[in-house]
Image: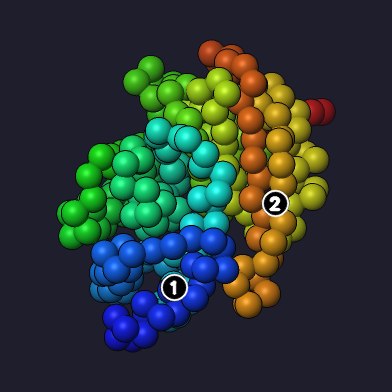
């Protein structure tokens, strides 16, 4: 796919979610796509390898959370994988401080290469488990926005994300199409950790009929010091009311 074709499709898709991009940003996304494809041959970063699909299912999908950022100064992307949604959000918000977190070192190496090649600044990459970071005083309860895309069910995800959000901050959870039961089962954990479900935005991505849900959790009070529990525990023993 030539840059000219990429630009045409990207502009059309971005317009559908009310996002405007300049040529410099489009070029960054194009370079990002090529790096993703190149690295994916060496390490497993994504099952999506078609360029049009990368554009829609990774880039545009990541940008659907833009409307919820408000006046945020900093954002942390937990379990970022190949950089979604954190890097696309950074590209269109150059003044936003972004932190990317992942537990696999090979992904960290890829992210650092992307940041270097795209000349992104004020962006930090951390090799860590979410549970460990949530107990680190440097990061605990310091973020306006904590986000995650397709990482865990909401009961587990709440314990990863809410300890990192400042009081009055938000967790933006990017999910697939079926979330009703998951949401119901997560209410106990969200309340215990100091949050409340503020909104569930259900929509379809592009013309692809891909069901999506964005769940906004508002942080109302400090998370108890005992959470998050040690690495691995939230996934093994989710906070579900007995």
Q: How many marks?
A: 2
Above or below — where is 1 with respect to 100? Answer: below
Name which of mark 1 and mark 2 comes first in the sequence: 1
Q: Looking at the picture, tell me which residue is in the foreground, 80 or 147.
A: 147
Residue shown at 45% from the left, 53% from the top? 85
State the image coordinates of residue 129 (x, y, percent, origin top left).
41, 36
Give the quarter of the image for residue 154: top right
Q: Is residue 78 left or right of residue 224?
A: left
Q: Residues within 10 Å of mark 1 (few under 14, many from 20)?
A: some
State the image coordinates of residue 96 (x, y, percent, origin top left).
35, 40
Q: Which label number is shown at residue 194?
A: none
Q: Which label number is shown at residue 11?
A: 1
- The CA span between labels 1 and 2 is 23 Å
Residue shown at 70% from the left, 51% from the top? 201
Q: Looking at the picture, tell me which residue is in the foreground, 3 or 174.
A: 3
Residue shown at 34% from the left, 20% from the top? 138
Above or below — where is 196 with respect to 42? Answer: above
Q: Is residue 220 visible?
A: yes
Residue shown at 31% from the left, 83% from the top? 4
SS label for mark 1: helix
Camera-nearest label, 1 or 2 = 1
Query: Which quarter of the rendered picture does the N terminus lie within?
Result: bottom left
Residue picked out by circle 2: 201
Q: Are marks 1 and 2 in contact (CB under 8 Å)?
A: no
Above or below — where is 43 with respect to 145? Answer: below
Q: Is residue 197 left or right of residue 69?
A: right
SS label for mark 2: strand
Q: Is residue 131 visible?
A: no
Give the quarter of the image for residue 240: top right
Q: Is residue 111 left or right of residue 214?
A: left
Q: Looking at the picture, tell me which residue is in the foreground, 176 or 239.
A: 176
């Amino acid at each position: 796919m030539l840059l000219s074709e990429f630009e045409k499709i990207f502009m059309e898709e971005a317009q559908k979610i009310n996002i405007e991009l300049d040529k410099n940003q489009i070029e960054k996304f194009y370079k990002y796509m090529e790096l993703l494809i190149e690295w994916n041959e060496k390490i497993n970063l994504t099952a999506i390898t078609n360029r049009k699909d990368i554009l829609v299912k990774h880039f545009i999908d990541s940008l659907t959370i833009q409307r919820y950022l408000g006046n945020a100064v900093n954002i942390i992307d937990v379990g970022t994988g190949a950089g979604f949604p954190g890097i696309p959000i950074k590209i269109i918000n150059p003044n936003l401080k972004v932190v990317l977190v992942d537990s696999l070192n090979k992904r960290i190496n890829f992210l650092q290469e992307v940041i270097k090649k795209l000349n992104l600044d004020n962006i930090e990459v951390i090799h860590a488990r979410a549970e460990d970071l949530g107990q680190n005083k440097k990061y605990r309860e310091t973020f306006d926005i904590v986000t995650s895309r397709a990482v865990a069910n909401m009961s587990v995800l709440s314990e990863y994300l809410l300890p990192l959000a400042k009081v009055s901050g938000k967790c933006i959870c990017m999910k697939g199409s079926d979330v009703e039961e998951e949401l119901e089962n997560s209410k106990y954990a969200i309340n215990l950790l100091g949050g409340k479900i503020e909104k569930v935005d259900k929509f379809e991505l592009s013309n692809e009929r891909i069901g999506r849900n964005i769940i906004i959790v508002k942080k109302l009070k400090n998370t108890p010091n005992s959470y998050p529990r040690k690495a691995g525990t939230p996934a093994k023993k989710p906070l579900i009311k007995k």
